[in-house]
Image (cartoon, rainbow, N blue to C red):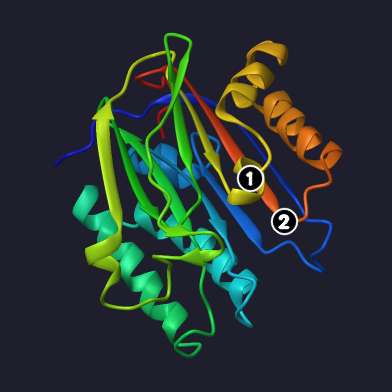
């Protein structure tokens, strides 16, 4: 697949340390036209949220490293397609296992927008929602029950078997919410949409409003989200 479009998006992101946590073990990744490599290589745009597993020693590190390494998708050695993204995610998984099996783990939801298509790779319980024509729907399934994860970054070869893949056509006006469970445990999808309308369609204001609600409800867990509003299927910014 040869990528020849670069969507123009408006993005907001925010992250909040949970009241019962010493550190914020969530991380977010925003790779859009404000990043030089994204503009120069025109491989689309990429967004992600990761939630470090607090029950292992290096959960926060795992989330941070996973988000940092995703920029490698814009290296010329990585094929600009879904298989290339999965290859990179598997490489990150093995890097996390280098810290010792079960010592570094996190969730991942990564959204790649390119060639009028949205691609999603989902591992764990960090849910993603899409809004189209004013209706919000979840496009991921929680992997696990309660506080027990059924899939995570750092689990090894089984990752390819359990990672959820989703793709769909991309349209101007599409809106995506990428959330960690510190958000979805307290905020309903309808409330996410309410925050969007109340913000006047401003992604950063919306992200901050959502976390304001989490704080108001005394969220115990770290909470993070990325809000992506598709403005145009082709950016006019060229390298």
Ranked by sequence position, the earlier of labels 1 and 2 is 1
Q: CA distance from mark 1 to mark 2?
A: 9 Å
Q: Residue 213 location, x and y as percent?
A: 78, 33
Q: Which corner quadrant of the image does residue 232 belong to?
A: top left
Quick check: 85 above or below 45?
below
Of labels 1 and 2, the one closer to you: 1
Disc 1 + disc 2, Cβ < 8 Å: yes
Identify the mark at residue 185; answer none if there is no mark. Answer: 1
Residue 221: mark: 2
Say which element carries label 1. Answer: loop
Instruction: Say left or right for 160 vs 177.
Output: left
Position of 171 compared to 25: left or right? left
* Residue displayed at 25% across by 36% down: 167
Q: Which mark is residue 210?
A: none
Q: Position of residue 14 (x, y in %)?
A: 70, 41
Q: Residue furthest bottom?
A: 100
Image quadrant containing the C terminus: top left
Crowdedness of circle 1 by 10 Å Cα count: few (<14), some, many (20+)?
Answer: few
Tell me which corner region of the image, top left, top right, bottom left or bottom right, holds residue 226. Answer: top right
Relative height, residue 115 to residue 83 (above, below): above
Position in image of residue 203 (x %, y %): 63, 25
When the figure is inspected, residue 143 is found, relative to residue 56, above or below; the finding is above
């Amino acid at each position: 697949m040869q990528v020849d479009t670069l969507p123009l998006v408006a993005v907001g992101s925010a992250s909040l340390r949970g009241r019962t946590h010493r550190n914020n073990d969530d991380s977010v990744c925003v790779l859009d036209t404000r990043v030089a490599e994204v503009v120069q290589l025109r491989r689309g745009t990429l967004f992600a949220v990761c939630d470090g597993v607090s029950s292992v020693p290096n959960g926060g590190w795992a989330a941070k490293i996973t988000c940092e390494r995703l920029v490698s998708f814009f290296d010329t050695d990585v094929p600009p397609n879904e298989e290339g993204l999965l290859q990179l995610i598997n490489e990150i998984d093995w890097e996390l296992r280098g810290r010792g099996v079960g010592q570094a783990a996190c969730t991942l939801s990564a959204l790649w927008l390119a060639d009028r298509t949205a691609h999603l790779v989902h591992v764990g319980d960090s849910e993603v929602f899409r809004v189209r024509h004013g209706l919000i729907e979840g496009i991921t399934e929680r992997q696990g029950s309660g506080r027990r994860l059924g899939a995570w970054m750092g689990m090894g070869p089984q990752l390819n078997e359990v990672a959820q893949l989703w793709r769909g056509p991309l349209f101007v006006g599409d809106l995506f919410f990428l959330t960690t469970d510190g958000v979805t445990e307290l905020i309903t999808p309808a409330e996410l949409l309410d925050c969007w309308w109340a913000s006047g369609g401003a992604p950063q204001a919306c992200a901050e409003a959502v976390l304001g609600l989490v704080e108001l409800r005394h969220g115990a867990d770290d909470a993070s989200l990325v809000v992506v509003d598709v403005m145009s299927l082709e950016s006019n910014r060229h390298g």
